Amino acid sequence: MAFSPSADLDAVLHLGDYLYEGAGGSGERTHAPAREIISLADYRERHGQYRSDLDLQAMSRQHPFITVWDDHESTNDSWRDGAENHTEGAEGVWAERKGFAQRAYDEWMPIRYPEPGNLARIWRQFRFGELLDLVMLDTRLFDRDQQLGTPPPAAAGDPGRRLIGPEQRQFLLDALSAPGVTWKLIGQQVMFGQLKVVGTPNVINDGGQYLNGDQWDGYRDERQAIFDHIAANGIDNTVVLTGDIHTSWAMDLTPDPNNPVELAGGYNPLTGGGSLGVEFVGTSVTSSGLPELAAVQDVLRVVNPHIKYVDLERKGYLLVDVTPTRTTGEWWYLSTIAERGGSESFGTAYPVDAGANRLGAATAATTPKAEAPALAPAIEPGPLPVTPGPGPDNGQNGGEGRFGGGSLSAATALLGLGVGLAVALGREPASGPEAERLD
């Protein structure tokens, strides 16, 4: 594939799995170092390699870049006190390994931490005029309890299980309640809405059999606390933006999706009644999806009536178009990820009207702004160091949308890249200042 510049994007969101920790790859895409990364030097070298991709250098030069980590920036299925892909002792001490991963992320990525010097806190908030607040969460390392397996057992619904934890949860609830904007966008890693293989109302067998214990389905009590807050406070226009799963999804968000009785707290799949918000899940740019399950994706929609769109195979990105009256998620897919070049094509789009809190019918692609700012001029790429030292100001290297910490040309990566989303604020100007940090 090749980077296709769009002049009217206001930001690019990356929702995690920016790199992968394993020893995989082949040919020009063989990982460096050629082993699983464990030490600080390993993590620095892997970031440096990823930052050498020319097309993502071009993307990062053109647009502000807002990022959070998921698990693979440290290692697979990581949580607060460990990881599935970490053997304590043989692979060092988890607290030290996690610290190495966080330090390398700080040195290489365009992020300004809300608490300078505290590399454990990346959850933060942005305000774009009177149009939207964007809350970026950490559902992985900050305060997540250990996963209970896939499919998750009944204990995954136990009270008190944490995915984001009480401190971060209160930060989110306060942000959702804050006045002054039309839309509340939440950028986070794992699927918020339910994904079941057997669906029942919540009063029967706790809602049925859930598929993936690494998602919010494995931490249902904390998800319900967020649903309760939205409902109790009459909060409109919540849009969750999700990565992690390498596939494309659009869904209504409702506490009890398999209960068709709306008056009993259920959800009407024909009208969307009972929905409290919507979720757009972006596919991965290049990382593998679930093509072997593509034949059953329509069955998943039957079992999960709140899910309106699923594509388990195609690679690309999600464009989110936000206006005062409507937010639209539209999926764009790539003709190839095996080589530079190729093309992109429109997949589908689903809108949510302001105040509706439910998805509308699939629609056509949005129209780019007629008077977008000019793109930055092209530059000849230069070599990048792969073992940088810390940034010049103790890791607070440039802030959101700017780059430092050893990079010679503003760059990101395309070696197995996870989920990226492009955000166009209305393809019309938002009122007020373009963006304001609220941390």
Image (cartoon, helix red, strand yellow):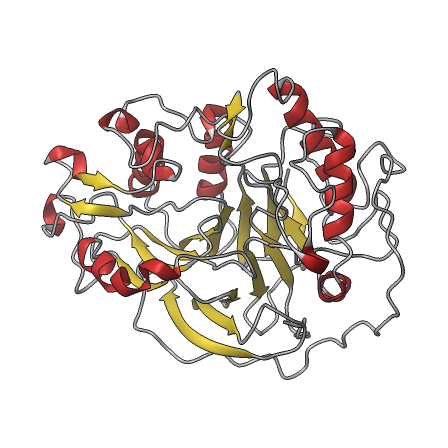
Q: Position of residue 270 (x, y in %)?
A: 17, 64
Q: Answer yes or no: is residue 229 visible.
A: no
Residue extending farthest to the front is: 27
Q: Is residue 88 above or below residue 134?
A: above
**Residue 125 lies in quadrant:** top right
Q: Position of residue 64 (x, y in %)?
A: 70, 58
What's the residue at 68%, 74% (across, down)? 5
Please identify the quadrant where the N terminus is shown. Answer: bottom right
What's the residue at 26%, 24% (across, down)? 155
What's the residue at 38%, 68% (across, down)? 351
Q: Is residue 239 left or right of residue 85?
A: left
Of residue 413 and residue 61, the one placed in the foreground of this image is: 413
Please identify the quadrant where the C terminus is shown. Answer: top right
What's the residue at 63%, 19% (across, down)? 95
**Residue 34 lies in quadrant:** top right
Q: Position of residue 429 (x, y in %)?
A: 61, 70
Q: Is residue 27 above or below residue 396?
A: below
